[in-house]
Amino acid sequence: MMHPPRLSLPSPFNKGVLILQHRLLKQTARLNNENQRFKIMHASGFYFDGKSSKKQSARLVFTGTAHWFVVSDEGDSLTTPESIAEARVSSRLGNTPTLIRFSQGGIFESVDHEALDAMLLPHRPRVNWAHRLESRLRYVVAGLLVTAAVVFCLIYYGIPAGAKAVAFALPEETTRVIGRGTLQLLDKEFLSQSKIDEQEQQRLRQRLLAFIPAINNIPVSVEFRNAPMIGANAFALPSGTIVFTDQLIFLAENDEDLLAIYGHEVGHVSHRHAMRQLLQASTLAIAVALFTGDLTSTSSLIAAAPVLLIQSGYSREFEREADLFALHTLQSNHISPKHFSTMLRKISASHQEENDKPAPDAKNAPEDHEGSDKVRWQTYLSTHPDTEERIKMFDEAR
């Protein structure tokens, strides 16, 4: 039995059918979107009328016309319809409740986030951006990296810069109070009256102050103290007072040795290193000074000063700045820089000798801790950072 041959439709006809099908699909999708837009949605939660702390179970009704209102579980309207575009909606963070504030003063609270997102996102796509960020791992990782970078920059750049600004802005009276209080605490804990002859103290003081009487409008003063727990050392206080220990004086063979050390300590005074170190270790003090303008609160700095100035030592940057100041000062006064390198060697050897001594037997001398304390303190103070490098710089200078 023979079948009649099939008739193939012309190519233009097939193309027209495809175009018609595409138009029908687009129209169907548009109608679906319109239906979704005008779909009434609900979100469960609680309503506060703004007049009392009492809350009542309620529902937020979205009309699909970009308006919403709140009704009680019994169906009573609690608010009038308001535009969703003008609503004050709190940003969603995790599973914390979302708050919607109405113009009448009422607040709707809900954790029905899925329903709220369905209402909000078509009309306010930027709402809940914080939640969308925290819900994506790549944004969380990026946030952690940015936070770490900010903290790093704050610690290594921000705090030192803030400390420097505050140190140079402090009034002279404040630095004088801090310096005086610091010296009093040092005298109480670590220092005692100098055993050097009074006439020799006066001669050395005049010799040193004639060399550099003041720096950057800061008057310099010199004090001598006996310091068996600290050993051979000199340090500058925030006020401009420079303290020489008897043990350091005994190491010097001539006045030029002491002038070299004195020039180094004046360098610390010139750059406000002591105050900057105190402030860098007291970030709270920097924040208070910068944001409140209170530059006179010094009690906490005075309490921390002895340990920070004596035990911690200066940073490499601070020591280099003071070294360069001393080097230029010695050269301009035609004093050999080798006096400084010679003293550095003697100070280092003196402290090393003390550190090598065995600590006293606590069982045989339970009441005497001076020896162990001395070793402990001189371990911190044995040398400034990079002593050999510093010695080399002064040895090679002309």
Image (cartoon, rainbow, N blue to C red):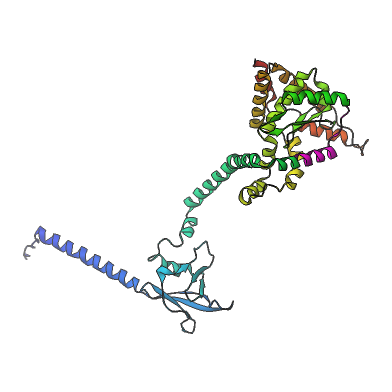
Camera-nearest residue between 71 and 106: 106
Residue 329 point in image, percent of width and height: 67, 22
The image position of residue 171, as x and y in percent, is 68, 42
Q: Residue at x 85, y 40 (%)?
A: 188
On-image quarter of the N terminus = bottom left
Predominant secondary structure, magenta span: helix
Q: Quadrant of the C terminus?
A: top right
| Side of 36 relative to 75 (left or right) | left
Residue 368, image x and y in percent? 91, 36
Q: Is residue 391 magenta?
A: no
Residue 144 vs residue 14, the one in the foreground: 144
Give x and y (percent) for residue 234: 77, 29
For this orientation, the residue located farthest to the right is 364
* Quadrant in the rendering for residue 28: bottom left
In the image, is residue 116 above or below residue 232?
Answer: below
Residue drawn 72% across the image and 20% down it: 340
Question: Looking at the image, can residue 79 be seen?
Answer: yes
Residue 315 makes an appearance in the image: no
Q: Nearer the viewer, residue 23 or 59?
A: 59
Is residue 319 toward the left or the right of residue 105 in the image? right
Q: Quadrant of residue 176?
A: top right
Q: Is residue 283 left or right of residue 18?
A: right
Residue range in magenta is 179-195
**Magenta stretch: includes residue 189:** yes
